[in-house]
Amino acid sequence: MPQDDKPFFRPRFVPWHDRWPACALALTAMAAVVVFGVAGVAAAWKNPLYTPYLWVPCLLIGMAGGVMVSLLARLARRSREGSQHEGPS
């Protein structure tokens, strides 16, 4: 028996990693990674020996920023749909 895509008789299942507390925790962790990357950029600019490795903290900042944008888009889409699960009141 195939499963319906959008069943009307039961709520949509949301996995634990897609709930608001998990997304908030991931956003907090990615913000810490961005701060760590900014500190790495500052250290690389101060020491001329580290300047060739400036790409590493920039990569960290870019990847963490991408995860943050993805999570914020997911949370915004879910709040627009009206299916905010375990969100703040």
Image (spheres, grey):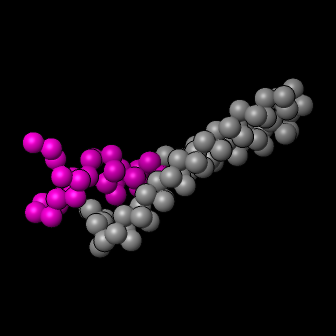
Residue 20 in percent (x, y) is at: 34, 58
Residue ranking furthest to the top: 49
* Corner quadrant of residue 83: bottom left
Q: Is residue 70 left or right of residue 42?
A: left
Residue 19 magenta-highlighted: yes
Residue 21 in percent (x, y) is at: 33, 55
Residue at 90% across, 31% down: 48
Residue 74 in percent (x, y) is at: 43, 57
Magenta segment, which residues?
1-28
Residue ranking furthest to the right: 48
Q: Is residue 42 left or right of residue 31?
A: right
Residue 42 magenta-highlighted: no
Q: Is residue 56 left or right of residue 73?
A: right
Nearest the viewer among 62 and 38 is 62
Residue at 9% across, 42% down: 1
Res. 42 in view = yes
Q: Quadrant of the C terminus?
A: bottom left
Residue at 22% across, 58% down: 6
Nearest the viewer among 79 and 30 is 79
Q: Is residue 89 left or right of residue 70?
A: left
Res. 36 in view = no
How many marks can you see? 0
Please, is residue 71 above or below residue 64 in the view? below
Residue ranking furthest to the front: 1
Residue 11 in percent (x, y) is at: 17, 60
Residue at 34% across, 69% down: 81
Please, is residue 82 above or below residue 35 in the view? below
Please, is residue 40 above or below residue 6 in the view? above
